[in-house]
Image: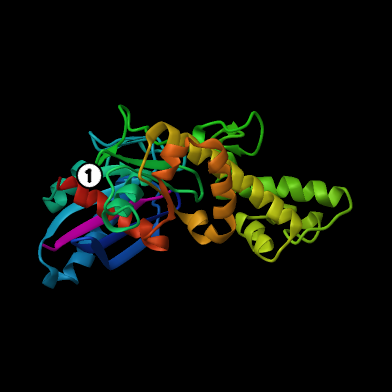
């Protein structure tokens, strides 16, 4: 049975309305409309309603809308449908995003944080299909986790389960999630850029060179992509940075494997793009750090939805709203 689903992705700089059809183990994106995040929550909800209404008017042959899902950075209260002051959404203080959309479209509406939404998408339609215990790691701008345990999404008592990026892996290191040496500090786009910048600056100060950046003037422009591009070209310092990132990723995964004993860990964004470089380092660290029996039962795989996981995420929350 096919179901027409609507999705609303709320980001700090941009939002998107998505329309898709879910059938069996797949989802097809019919249409998408993005727009810059408006200055007020009310305006964002209004623009989403208009955008989704317009998308629906162009796809009348697909049947009636079944549900709407909303994906947004936390903290939030999924049970009450409230967005609770995310750091990248100033002014979104206790905003009810569910009720206005339910009243406008007359269908079930659900809200989940973005990591949970991506976990649901991978579980239903991506690399997590067929398992009952799965961890999804974002490994992009930040490091968040979505947990599927015993065949259900696990969000915790205050919707804060899966904040893996806040775990401290070292007493010092790049800052991520407000904490030096955290999992997010070592394993996120911003964290990798900061680590690469610090190591490149030291190399240049000592009179050496690195393909990460040509000279001191380029230090501030270093990105995670620049680090991985240089590493793929064989630059020694970039490979050293990637080695640190891979070992910390392995250590973080070992904690999750020992604690949760999942069947599969699905990793998005940076890992999905750089698996060839990272996987050997990660697996070597896992062999040292994780319980052998638990590690043997767990697959480590890249996102099956790839760069489309964000589009599918809010639609997976819509499917979740239907129970």
**Residue 117 image position (x, y, % from top left):** 32, 48
Residue 37 in sight from this viewpoint:
yes
Residue 227 sits inside the magenta stretch: no
Tell me the quarter of the picture where residue 149 sits: top left
Q: Is label 1 in a helix, a strand or a loop?
A: strand
Nearest the viewer among 43 and 312 is 312
Residue 9 sits inside the magenta stretch: yes
Does 60 sit left or right of 281 as displayed?
A: left
Nearest the viewer among 169 and 115 is 169
**Residue 241 image position (x, y, % from top left):** 68, 50
Vertical relation: 196 (above or below) 34 = above
Label 1 crowd bin: few (<14), some (14–19), many (20+), radius 10 Å? many
- Magenta-colored segment: predominant secondary structure: strand
Rendered-image quadrant of the N terminus: bottom left
Rendered-image quadrant of the C terminus: top left
Residue 43 in sight from this viewpoint:
no
**Residue 65 image position (x, y, % from top left):** 14, 59
Render colour scheme: rainbow
Instruction: Give the residue at x 40% y 36%.
Output: 162
**Residue 285 image position (x, y, % from top left):** 58, 43
The residue segment tinted magenta is 1-11
> Mark 1 sits on what residue?
110
Nearest the viewer among 247 and 107 is 247
Q: How many marks?
A: 1
Does 315 sit left or right of 107 as displayed?
A: right
């Amino acid at each position: 049975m096919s179901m027409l689903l609507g999705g609303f992705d709320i980001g700090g700089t941009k939002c998107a309305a998505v329309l898709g059809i879910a059938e069996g183990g797949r989802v097809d994106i019919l249409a998408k409309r993005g727009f810059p995040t408006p200055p007020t929550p009310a305006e964002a909800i209004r623009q989403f309603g208009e955008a989704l209404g317009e998308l629906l008017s162009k796809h009348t042959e697909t049947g009636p809308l079944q549900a709407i899902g909303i994906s947004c950075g936390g903290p939030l209260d999924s049970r009450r449908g409230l967005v609770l002051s995310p750091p990248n959404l100033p002014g979104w203080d206790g905003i009810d995003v569910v009720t206005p959309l339910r009243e406008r479209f007359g269908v079930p509406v659900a809200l989940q944080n973005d990591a949970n939404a991506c976990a649901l998408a991978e579980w239903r339609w991506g690399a997590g299909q067929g398992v009952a215990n799965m961890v999804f790691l974002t490994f992009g701008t930040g490091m968040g986790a979505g947990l599927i345990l015993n065949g259900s999404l696990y969000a915790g008592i205050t919707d804060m389960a899966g904040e893996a990026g806040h775990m401290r892996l070292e007493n010092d290191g790049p800052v991520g999630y407000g904490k030096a040496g955290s999992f997010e500090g070592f394993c996120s786009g911003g964290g990798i850029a900061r680590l690469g910048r610090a190591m490149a600056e030291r190399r240049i100060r000592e009179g050496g060179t690195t393909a990460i950046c040509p000279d001191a003037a380029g230090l501030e422009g270093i990105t995670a992509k620049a680090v991985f591009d240089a590493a793929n070209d064989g630059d020694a310092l970039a490979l050293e940075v990637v080695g640190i990132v891979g070992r910390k990723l392995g250590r973080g995964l070992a904690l999750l494997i020992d604690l949760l004993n999942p069947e599969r860990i699905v990793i998005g964004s940076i890992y999905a793009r750089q698996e060839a470089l990272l996987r050997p380092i990660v697996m070597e660290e896992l062999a040292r750090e994780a319980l052998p029996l638990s590690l043997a039962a767990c697959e480590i795989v890249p996102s099956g939805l790839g760069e489309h996981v964000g589009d599918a995420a809010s639609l997976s929350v819509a499917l979740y709203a239907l129970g």
